[in-house]
């Protein structure tokens, strides 16, 4: 059974940093691209970032380029999202998802709140 | 403003059929596969359709997808009260080198 469990969310001040983690199990993690998707309060889904199975290729939506960094540790079956220079508009539930072109499985999400 | 355009809401009675449209451009829907996701209230999204019309294991055949040019459609037949949810289309945008979603459609069962 595929399981994706996010952690690391919380309250952070504008301009601050946060690192999200996603622990994956139930599939061959190193073989699969992974993505982060977020959902602001009362809003729709927004694709944030993606990474290839070997970590060599990364992708970002324009609004987070230069501020967020996606990475993975295949020895730990873990996906990460380093978020710097956080803004109020980054407030959202952040989901870890299996896949890139279509998202087969999703975690339960972790809430990030950017506020002073 | 989402890259893909969906109607904000649709409604229909139990047992009826409903369709949800998703409009894009040649850089996204026109040249890439479309997927559809269902998000029940308070839960994470779930994959319903991938590669335009394929259903993952466990998804009933009441849900179907199609694509024509730069538009895609999700059809749901035999509507049930449990289908009341938000539905999102998604695809890859080759110009942006990024994933994109529609704004979501709220399905209400009358």
Image (cartoon, rainbow, N blue to C red):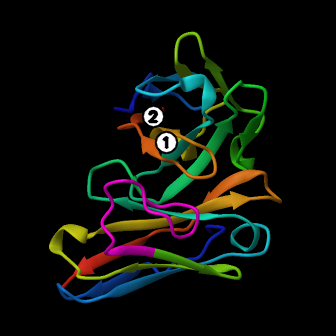
> Which secondary structure type mostly characterizes the magenta part of the structure?
loop
Residue A1 occupies which quadrant of the picture? top left
Horizontal and vertical percent position of residue B50: 52, 60
Query: Position of A20 compared to A31: left or right?
Result: left
Horizontal and vertical percent position of residue A64: 69, 41
* Magenta residues (range): B48-64
Q: What number is the disc on residue A112?
A: 2
Q: Residues within 10 Å of mark 1 (few under 14, many from 20)?
A: many
Residue B8 colored magenta? no
Q: Of residues A22 and A93, which is closer to you in this image?
A: A22
| Residue indicated by mark 1 | A91
Query: Position of A16 compared to B7: left or right?
Result: right
Residue at 41% across / 85% down in the picture?
B19
Residue A84 occupies which quadrant of the picture? top right
In contact (CB < 8 Å): disc 1 and disc 2:
yes
Residue at 27% across / 51% down in the picture?
B42
Q: Chain of mark 1?
A: A
Judged from this view, the residue extending furthest toward the right is B95
Residue at 53% across / 25% down in the picture?
A28
Query: Position of A78 compared to B30: left or right?
Result: left
Query: Position of A75 compared to B62: left or right?
Result: right
Q: Secondary structure at mark 2?
A: strand
């Amino acid at each position: 059974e595929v399981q994706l469990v996010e952690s690391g969310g919380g309250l952070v001040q504008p301009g601050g940093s946060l690192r999200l983690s996603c622990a994956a199990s139930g599939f061959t993690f190193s073989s699969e691209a992974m993505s982060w998707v977020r959902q602001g309060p009362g809003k729709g889904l927004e694709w944030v970032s993606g990474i290839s199975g070997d970590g060599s290729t990364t992708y970002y939506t324009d609004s987070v380029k230069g501020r967020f960094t996606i990475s993975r540790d295949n020895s730990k079956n873990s996906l990460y999202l380093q978020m710097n220079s956080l803004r109020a508009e980054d407030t959202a539930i952040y989901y870890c998802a299996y896949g890139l072109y279509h998202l087969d499985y999703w975690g339960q999400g972790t809430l990030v709140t950017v506020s002073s | 403003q989402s890259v893909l355009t969906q109607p904000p809401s649709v409604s229909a009675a139990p047992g009826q059929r409903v369709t949800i449209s998703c409009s894009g451009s040649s850089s996204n829907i026109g040249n890439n596969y479309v997927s559809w996701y269902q998000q029940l209230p308070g839960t994470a999204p779930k994959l319903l359709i991938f590669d335009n019309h394929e259903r993952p294991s466990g998804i009933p055949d009441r849900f179907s997808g199609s694509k024509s040019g730069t538009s895609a459609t999700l059809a749901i037949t035999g509507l049930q009260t449990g289908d009341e949810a938000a539905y999102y289309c998604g695809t890859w945008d080759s110009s942006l080198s990024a994933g994109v979603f529609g704004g979501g459609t709220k399905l209400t069962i009358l």
